[in-house]
Image: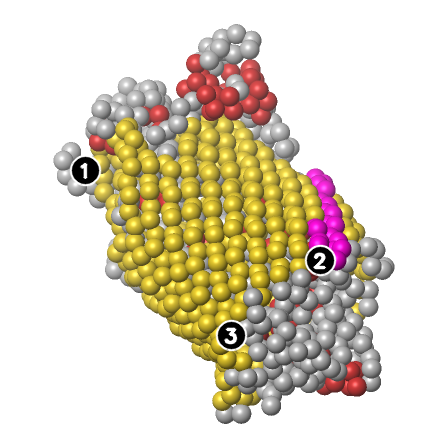
């Protein structure tokens, strides 16, 4: 008979283990929800019918006790049905060590990797796991940062905080991923995402110290929550019986960001103890970071005057052509115009950004997390109450200065002052075209806009779950759990915009595209040069509440040591509520009496303006033409004198975008697990069917045709039958083949379903209207994987996958009059649309977008993983090791079509390929680890707005490192560094009909976020 599958994971000392020669392990066959299907049988000395258990921090090999603390403990709410396998035989050096009575004791990152490897090998479907090095000791400071090591997982970082925030899996964006905590579905949002009403999960809300393990399921199982076409991610919290006896673990660190040059603290404390059958655990984690970034912003693409003026030149009553991402018209016929030897046609076809402006921000992030667990555990009964509380707060200051190109034009009948309204056409004074048709040089009659924007966002997340699992007999196991969670997030953005009209400015990005030359003949630091201050105050509130209940029974019908057949029946109920509200306090703030008397409209506003930027002179990349200082308003004027927060709270809810939506999903499922001998080895399998019935109730407001809104309630629903099947076969002792097939769904964003008339950006004449009849996307997916465990603790695997998705959302766009929308003019920034009076004409045309089910998408990919401990090298190099992955993705069905008819496949939100490589060294008390994670360029949309430009997120590579030295169990010194190379992140706009590289000259949000370094100590008692 074959040897235990765990032999390779343990033998190299890749875990903190004591390996004895008498251990015996059992294969699991299924992966029931509520546990990871990674349980191991008791040792050979124990009865074969003894209930099995597992640890939420990883599969515990037979006869193994993790270093000083972790003992086998149940992973979650349901024990899996397994049968005993023949006793394992340790391999290679582990064999010799066991026979010689030696113990292999290794701790740290190797243990984390090997436990994850053991979990992967035990699974039937395709599953990867990240395991804490010890209780309260996650490998990375951020859970999302750990997940990017997994093949097919791509990380998105929050630029303001420099932290990992969201993940995408296998070529699908983050809203195709379902996240659960202890197998209970949850949602959370944070930072600038508040109010976006997506189905995403933001990992940066939580400190990594709150979790002991993360499982990523890439193939469907009937017991998994539906909704994750990309995959399912389960975060598991620690419980008292995960460790033996009393454990006290602490961390204390100081963080430093090279861009902001500021320090912040980070620390955690976890206490866990068991007394008899009772246990209690409590943990707390706190951190504060301050990050800064600066660079160039175009705020939304590039366009030419020829394309951008099409709408102006279209006679009334005729269909409007595509006008690009924004409208404008150069004043090339002005007597002042100097085209620099170019023709008017060349200049009008040259490309300009929506803005050419300086951007700088400072973000102060504070996070507090709590985790607790009470547990009662016997040989047959396991009951626990687990809770999480997390609070994340961001205070961000943003400062911009530059020229607004959008909506600028001069009409023949204008009576406006220079630079304003219908007399804002930009005059080329001395211009040039680069090789990619980008227009740059000196321009007259420009409108300089400076903004002081102060953001505050906060998320409070609460979660509680009661779980119980009971072994009725040695073959029948039942479990149940109930969960409540809610995430309450808000985001306030309060700004003052001021103007310099009719200015002469120069824009030249040819020398430095991140820090381009942006100059003016008018002093930008003199507050008295600015006029017409306007307020833009706003607050978004987003509430997510979930109630879940779940029950399941496992009945092991056959278990004769070589054959196993288990029937699993279960059901669940999930109620999800999302509520969105937006308020705009601008009007109240402008009209209210201020503490010193007068109102915003009557006081000398610019007496409160400072000549400098509060965060100090900006970096300029060596280009003195990039402004390092300009006049700004301080936060205390906006939040104190003008009381922006009070004005927002006092303002009414904007009914056009407000809604409350509830989804009620009742589900039943059954699965069968089996194993049987085949060709001298073992075949394991899982097959099941999931039925879900979804009911929706949407309460929102619809335009009543009288300039207002009336409440409206809409009900809908649908049901789905979702089959799945997986098999795993050990072709050889160290070679496992897997195959899976199944169906699952992803529900669309609630904003596209429940929203009435949403305003994505008040500075653009665009609206999105919800479609309550939008159906979920349905995917049929297939997987095949070969895994070669060629040495102890080593893996080389190659996998292919395919997903065919139907009912994809498709954006249908048309133009409607502003008057037909039934929304007030205050939902837009009328001044930016070219109406200084604040009144928008009823016949003004607005682009409307409605999402419908129409598209299809076919996705296929390749995943390669390699992991090995280099124990074959001579000392001291035998402490080296590597873990790496590569993912290649190909999509069909989403093509960008240029005006010439050229088609370019776009994988919206995901790159064509990505890879991750982590090298590590662990020897004695010293540990060193370096990780490089790279993602290729990422297309953002396949929609051609008429300017033939594809927006891409530029390729990104991030280098992170960790070094530690352990004096003893009580004290370990540690240094962490994130973004060591200070990667330049940016968006660029590529024209497929131009030579390669053209898009790199057209950038947006081109920033440097700095390196974050943490110095600290951690340990346990």
Label 3 secondary element: strand
Mark 2 touches mark 3? (CB < 8 Å): no
Residue 277 marker: 2
Q: Looking at the picture, tell me which residue is in the foreground, 74 or 871.
A: 74
Residue 713 in the image: state x and y as whole percent.
29, 37
Q: Quadrant of residue 966?
A: bottom right
For label 1, the SS is loop
Which label sits on residue 314?
1
Q: Which residues are magenta?
A: 261-281
Magenta stretch: includes residue 265: yes
| Mark 3 vs 1, N-terminal side | 1
Which of pointers 1 and 2 indicates the residue nearer the eye? 2
What's the mark number on residue 57? none
Q: Is residue 159 above or below residue 91?
A: above
Foreground of the two, 114 or 27: 27
Residue 943, position as x, y percentages in the image: 31, 52
Magenta segment, prevailing SS (helix, strand or loop): strand
Residue ID at (53%, 20%):
643
- Measured Cα–Cα span from mark 3 to mark 1: 73 Å
Name the quadrant of the C terminus: bottom right
Q: Which residue is identified by label 3?
A: 556
């Amino acid at each position: 008979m074959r040897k235990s599958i765990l032999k390779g994971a343990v033998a190299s000392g890749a875990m903190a283990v004591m390996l004895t020669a008498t251990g015996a392990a059992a294969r699991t066959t299924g992966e029931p929800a509520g546990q990871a299907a990674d349980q191991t049988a008791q040792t050979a000395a124990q009865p074969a019918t003894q209930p099995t258990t597992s640890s939420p921090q990883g599969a515990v090999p037979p006869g193994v006790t993790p270093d000083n603390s972790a003992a086998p403990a149940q992973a979650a709410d349901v024990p899996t049905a397994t049968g005993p396998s023949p006793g394992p035989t340790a391999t290679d050096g582990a064999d010799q060590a066991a026979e010689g009575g030696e113990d292999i004791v290794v701790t740290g990152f190797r243990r984390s990797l090997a436990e994850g490897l053991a979990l992967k090998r035990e699974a039937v479907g395709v599953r990867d796991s990240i395991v804490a090095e010890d209780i309260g000791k996650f490998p990375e400071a951020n859970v999302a940062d750990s997940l990017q090591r997994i093949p097919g997982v791509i990380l998105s970082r929050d630029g303001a905080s420099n932290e990992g925030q969201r993940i995408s899996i296998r070529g699908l964006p983050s809203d195709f991923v379902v996240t659960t905590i202890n197998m209970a579905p949850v949602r959370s949002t944070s930072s600038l995402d508040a109010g976006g009403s997506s189905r995403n999960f933001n990992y940066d809300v939580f400190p990594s110290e709150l979790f002991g393990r993360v499982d990523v399921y890439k193939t469907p199982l009937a017991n998994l929550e539906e909704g994750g076409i990309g995959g399912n991610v389960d975060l598991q919290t620690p419980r008292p019986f995960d460790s033996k006896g009393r454990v006290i673990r602490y961390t204390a660190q100081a963080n430093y960001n090279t861009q902001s040059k500021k320090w912040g603290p980070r620390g955690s404390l976890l206490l866990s103890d068991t007394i008899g059958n009772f246990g209690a655990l409590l943990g707390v984690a706190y951190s504060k970071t301050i990050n800064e970034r600066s660079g160039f912003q175009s705020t939304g693409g590039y366009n030419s005057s020829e394309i951008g003026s099409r709408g102006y030149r279209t006679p009334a009553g005729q269909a409007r052509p595509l006008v690009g991402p924004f409208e404008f018209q150069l004043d090339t016929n002005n007597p002042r115009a100097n085209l620099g030897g170019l023709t008017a046609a060349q200049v009008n076809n040259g490309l300009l950004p929506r803005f050419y402006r300086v951007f700088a921000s400072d973000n102060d992030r504070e996070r507090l997390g709590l985790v607790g667990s009470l547990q009662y555990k016997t040989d047959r009964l396991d009951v626990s109450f687990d809770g999480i509380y997390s609070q994340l707060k961001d205070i961000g200051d943003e400062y911009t200065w530059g020229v607004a190109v959008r909506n600028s034009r001069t009409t023949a009948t204008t009576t406006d002052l220079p630079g304003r309204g219908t007399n804002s056409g930009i005059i080329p004074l001395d211009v040039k075209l680069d090789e990619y048709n980008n227009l740059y040089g000196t321009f007259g009659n420009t409108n300089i806009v400076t903004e002081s924007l102060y953001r505050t966002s906060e998320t409070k997340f609460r979660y509680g779950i009661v779980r119980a699992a009971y072994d009725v007999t040695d073959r029948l196991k039942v479990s149940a759990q109930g969960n409540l969670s809610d995430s309450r997030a808000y985001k306030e953005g309060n700004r003052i915009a001021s103007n310099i009209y009719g200015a002469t400015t120069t824009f030249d990005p040819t020398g430095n595209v991140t820090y381009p030359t942006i100059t003016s003949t008018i002093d930008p630091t003199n507050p008295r040069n600015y006029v017409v201050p306007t307020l833009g105050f706003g607050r978004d509130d987003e509430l997510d509440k979930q109630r879940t209940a779940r029950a399941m029974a496992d009945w092991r019908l056959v278990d004769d040591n070589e054959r196993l057949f288990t029937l699993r029946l279960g059901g669940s109920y999930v109620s999800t509520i999302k509520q969105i509200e937006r308020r705009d306090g601008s009007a109240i703030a402008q009209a209210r009496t201020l503490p010193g008397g007068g109102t915003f409209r009557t006081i000398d506003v610019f007496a409160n303006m400072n000549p400098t930027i509060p965060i100090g002179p900006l970096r300029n990349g060596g280009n003195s033409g990039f402004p390092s200082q300009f006049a700004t308003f301080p936060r205390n004027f906006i939040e104190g004198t003008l009381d922006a927060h009070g004005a927002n709270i006092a303002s009414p809810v904007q009914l056009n975008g407000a809604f409350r939506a509830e989804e009620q999903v009742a589900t039943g499922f059954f699965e069968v697990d089996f194993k049987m001998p085949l060709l001298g080895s073992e075949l394991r399998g899982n097959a099941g069917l999931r039925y879900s019935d979804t009911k929706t109730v949407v309460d929102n407001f619809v335009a009543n045709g009288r300039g207002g809104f009336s409440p409206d309630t809409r009900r809908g629903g649908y049901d789905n039958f979702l089959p799945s099947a997986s098999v795993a076969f050990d072709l050889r002792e160290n070679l496992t083949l897997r195959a899976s097939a199944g169906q699952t769904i992803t529900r669309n964003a609630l904003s596209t379903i429940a929203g009435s008339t949403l305003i994505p950006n008040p500075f653009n004449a665009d609206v999105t209207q919800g479609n309550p009849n939008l159906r979920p996307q349905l995917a049929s997916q297939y997987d095949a994987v070969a895994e070669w465990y060629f040495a102890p603790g080593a893996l080389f695997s190659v996998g292919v996958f395919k997903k065919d998705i139907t009912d994809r959302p498709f954006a249908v766009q048309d133009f409607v009059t502003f008057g037909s929308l039934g929304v007030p003019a205050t939902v837009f920034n009328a001044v930016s649309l070219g109406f200084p009076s604040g009144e928008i004409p009823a016949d003004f045309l607005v682009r409307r977008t409605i999402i419908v089910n129409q598209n299809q998408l076919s996705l296929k990919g390749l995943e390669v993983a390699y992991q090995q401990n280099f124990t074959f090298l001579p000392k001291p190099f035998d402490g080296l090791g590597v873990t790496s992955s590569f993912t290649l993705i190909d999509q069909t069905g989403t093509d960008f079509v240029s005006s010439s008819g050229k088609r370019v496949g776009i994988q919206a939100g995901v790159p064509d390929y990505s890879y991750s490589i982590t090298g590590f060294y662990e020897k004695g008390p010293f540990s060193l680890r370096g990780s490089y994670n790279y993602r290729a360029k990422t297309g953002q949309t396949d929609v051609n707005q008429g300017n033939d430009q594809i927006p891409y997120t530029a390729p990104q590579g991030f280098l992170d490192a960790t070094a530690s030295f352990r004096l003893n169990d009580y004290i370990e010194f540690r240094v962490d560094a994130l973004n060591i190379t200070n990667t330049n992140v940016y968006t660029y706009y590529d024209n497929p009909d131009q030579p390669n590289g053209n898009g790199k000259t057209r950038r947006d949000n081109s920033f440097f976020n700095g390196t974050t370094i943490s110095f600290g100590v951690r340990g346990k008692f």
